[in-house]
Image (cartoon, rainbow, N blue to C red):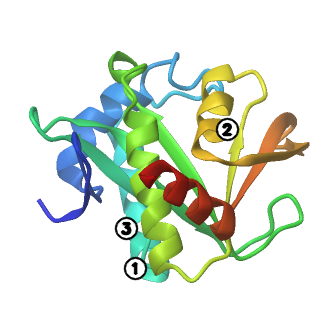
Amino acid sequence: MNILIETQRLFLKELEHSDSTDLFEMDADPDVHLFIENKPVNSMDEITTIIENLKKQYEKFGIARWAVVHKITHECIGWAGLKYFDYPLNCHNNFYELGYRFKKKHWGNGFVTESSTAILDYGFKNLNTESIFAITNPKNETSNKVLTKLGFDFKETFDYEGGPTNWYELSKTSWERKRLHQKN
């Protein structure tokens, strides 16, 4: 396992085809897709395509979503990471967006916050960016709360693929101030 980041309970690594079964379990669950396009996967071929697309992002941008692996069980419990947008979204272009998705059985355990905190640290220290953005469905109360807890500022609701989407921004300055405050 080529670990990129280690947290108290998790390893973060590039997604591999060996993660396919776990990703299928997650992405075939309609509850997981309730607030994201409502399109659960139906086959392992779809997962293979997703992994191949992520591998292309790793090659092109050096970053993409990463597998989140539980340290004790070595189960891939979901993915989280930064996606680089080199095309426009909500009047922005050439930016990083934080995203995450976890198996339902692991919801409510703080894994999103734990993995996202490490990813944001990595992003601001290594990617020469002044802001990281995030989007979520306005009805996804949990995701909206997590983004606020991480220090993101709600900016607006915009139309994304025919539906309302909340747009968040976290500046490097705000992140560094928050992390310094947590250490003291």
Question: Which residue sits at x=58%, y=54%?
Answer: 178
Q: Secondary structure at mark 2?
A: helix
Estimate how packed mark 3 is, as few (under 14), some (14 to 19) or many (20 or more) residues with alpha carbons within 10 Å. Answer: some
Provide residue 166's location: percent of width, then percent of height.
80, 39
**Residue matched to label 3:** 55
Q: Is residue 95 above or below residue 184?
A: below
Q: Secondary structure at mark 3?
A: helix
Mark whose residue sits in front, 3 or 2: 2
**Residue matched to label 2:** 148
Distance in Å between CA atoms under marks 1 and 3: 6 Å
Amino acid type of the residue tagged 3 in the rendering: Lys
Q: Is residue 163 left or right of residue 110?
A: right
Answer with mark 1 or mark 2, whichever residue precedes in sequence: 1
Question: Which residue sits at x=81%, y=38%?
Answer: 165
Q: Is residue 174 left or right of residue 125?
A: right
Residue 77 falls in which quadrant of the image?
top left
Q: Specify whether residue 82 is in view.
A: yes
Q: Is residue 66 above or below residue 61?
A: above
Q: Secondary structure at mark 1?
A: helix
